[in-house]
Image: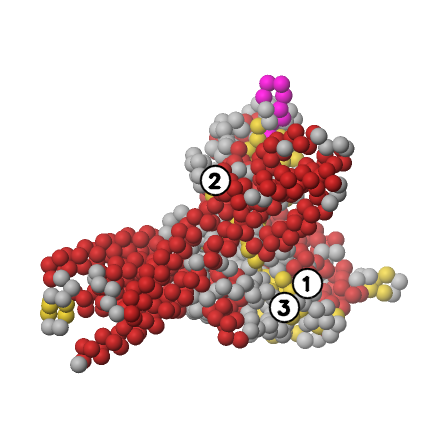
Amino acid sequence: MPREHKGRREILDAISLLPSVSGLLSEHDGQFEHEIDLEVVVYGRNYGGKKVGPYVSLRTYESGEIVVKEGDWGGDAFYIVVSGRAEVFVKNSSSRVAALDPPAHFGEMSVLAGVPRNATIKAPADGQVTVLEVQRPALRLLRKLPEFSAALDKAYRTHGKNVTLEGLKAAGFNPAAIDQLRSISLFRVYSKNHVLFSEGALMDRVYIIMDGWINRSIEPDAARKLQEDFLARGYCFGTEGIDKDLDWPYTATVLGRTEALEISISQLRSNTRLRADLAKDLAKFEPPKIAGSPIRRRTLSAQRTLIETGLVDATNLLVMDMDLCVRCGNCSLACHKVHGQSRLLRRGIHVSRLVSPTARSVQSILSPEVCMHCNDPECLTGCPTGAIGRFSGGQIDINTKTCIGCGDCAMNCPYDAISMTPRKGKQAAASGGLLGKLREFLRIAPDPLPSAVEQTDDLLAVKCNLCQGTSLNPPDSKRPAYSCEENCPTGALARVNPREYFTEIGDIEGLLIINPGHAAGRNIHRSDPVKRIINIAGVLLTLLITASALFGLSRYGLGGRLAGFLNMRWLTGLAGLAGIGVVMAYPLRRQIYKKRAGPLRYWLLTHSYAGVIAAVLIFLHSGVESGGLLTTLLVISFDLTIFTGIFGILCYYTAPRLLTKIEGAPLLIDDLRERQRELQKELAETGAASAAVNELVTRKVIPSFLSFRFMLRQYLKRESLSRAVAGAREALKADISKMPSEREKRKLDRAIEIAVTLRRIDSLVFLHRLLKLWIPPHVAATSLMLALVLVHIIQVIYFASR
């Protein structure tokens, strides 16, 4: 174990020896220029009773002791050599590859880039090394020092250049040429909206895009329309200008933080050998011509949305296929059950995209307000205690022990994926008595809302951590499990790698891929082998069991003995009872949230097929005679259970697809109801503006656009809201023109727009309700059926034993 130097004087002396951080001790007129920063970094400081810092420690490692180990996730600290020498080792090398003398830095790239350590650093075999360990929160304070900022920037650029050049070697470039390229290239980081080069300007540089997104555009003129496309990392721009002077044929604009290697063409031309070696290799990674392959408008729109919103920069993105989402809220409830508070809100970024570049069908995707574990997370900057960071699974998580509830991470997150909650959680108000518990059991109750946060609360930042550290992901688990995805009954949710899931993004990446992220997730929307197996097995079992039962009945009848006391009535009854037992496993599985019990979507499929098989067997078991009163009631309750179940399946299949066709961006029913009330109030106020407007609103607008017929039109025509409003205005165009004043014309026009919008919202609310309307009668019929089945079994056993 390293020996820690506890004395603050020793730490201050060590800082004074290090040029990059010695500015922390600079004085002016007898006072420390950075007095508060020095106090926080070296001594620590109390803010409202909460300790912040210290962020540095001085440690001495004895002979052979490891400071950092290659492959470890240690993104919370970096080191500066104070005395002695540190040795660098990498895998597949038994001897050291480098030595670090004072005042060398190491480990900073693990902190800045959120990646595992890329080398093992240890004390020499014949001596010791003393290092200053600096925690990540100190970065924002030390960046104020020009020397430290310059050293950090140089380290980042050097690392970026090395990674890019090593990537070129791995791509088959001449190693000798790459070594020469090091002296004439610059590693650059560009911010959003930076113009890389402009159409018509001279090609004077080659750009190798290491990471980021580029928008290429050709300005329109009399002979052509605007042409544009998007490209990702892995392309080389400007290679055609190496051998001869050319102008850029388009403008390239950076759409997000982008890293690139710049190579001066003039310097490249001055080295004939280097130009010959590189020109051919670089040409392999030229981007396609901007007009070479026409891009469909919807694909281009999806690419723009994905890039500009930053969804493509996620390492683990939660997506919801809204054609499959039945708006049950079980994803939020599952998150609440596992973590004590839901970290998932079904609002977020909506993407409408083609299923494939040549397809006609459109997929409606929602990325809800939940952490996407960004490749370059903004929430990490500014945390005063380093409580938030990237952990070994690649997830961004918060250490509850060191979080002081300042809210900096929540304010920095551009996706509202971090919320502040009282550290001592308040219990939500109970739903009330037996009825409330029943409503919660049947999932009719709304999603649980977090308790209100008061200013005096001791707050804690909470966010999605991919369910790491919970019972869903024990240490020996082979695959990750996420409570929201595991408990979605239809498979609408999936954790995915966006660059693989969105084919329109994967298609614009170059062949020279240098910097892969910590991607995770399986695309169950495209390929789900288990679902396919259950479907095949369900269909085959249904057909096989039905055929076998019909064959047995045709040969033996219901009463004909097969073996001993067994006859077809007993056999179909027992098999039907077994099917009912399988069916009832699904509601039991719905109560399991904190343990792995298999994805709920597979249980629902099994539930459906077992229900069909049980229905066939029970119908055959009951025969053609109604029997006594109890038997008749049992058959009726069974019929109701089957009917409501089939109705529910139809609702689950049709209602979400209708919703995605007419709602545009997905909306929660709470938002729809709120908007419904606002529009109803506004319509009443608009009608009261004048007698003429009120007369037309009452006589024509309301009967025409708030009618049941107009509501049916929403489902049948499925037109956009803007087109529906335009059609309504056209229908009452003559009435609008007859209004005596411009003000009344505007009022009537607005009343028409409100009425059409209100009816659209009514149609959406009805579909939301329809998705839950079938559940109470289905549950009631099932409960009655189970009770009567129990009575029937007792009755059968009683009479059989007589």
Tell me if mark 3 has few (under 14), some (14-19) or many (20+) residues whose alpha carbon lies within 10 angstroms of its own.
some
Front residue of this view, candidates 792 and 122:
792
* The N terminus - image quarter: bottom right
Please report the bounds of the magenta region as a residue range.
215-224
Query: Mark 3 belongs to which amino acid?
Result: Ser
Front residue of this view, candidates 16 and 380:
380
Q: Which mark is residue 451?
A: 3
Instruction: Quickly name the residue at label 1.
Output: 407
Q: Is residue 116 above or below residue 401?
A: above
Q: Which mark is residue 703?
A: none
Q: Position of residue 592 (x, y in %)?
A: 43, 69
Q: Position of residue 142 (x, y in %)?
A: 72, 59
Mark 2, mark 3: which one is toward the viewer?
Answer: 2
Q: In the image, 591: left or right of 18?
A: left
Mark 2, mark 1: which one is toward the viewer?
Answer: 2
Q: Is the Cβ of the residue at disc 2 closer than 8 Å to that at disc 3? A: no
Badge 1 or badge 3: first in the primary sequence: 1
Query: Mark 2 belongs to which amino acid?
Result: Leu
Q: Position of residue 581 (x, y in %)?
A: 31, 68
In the rendered image, the residue lying farthest to the top is: 223
Instruction: Quickly name the residue at label 2.
Output: 716
- Tell me the chief SS of the magenta region: loop
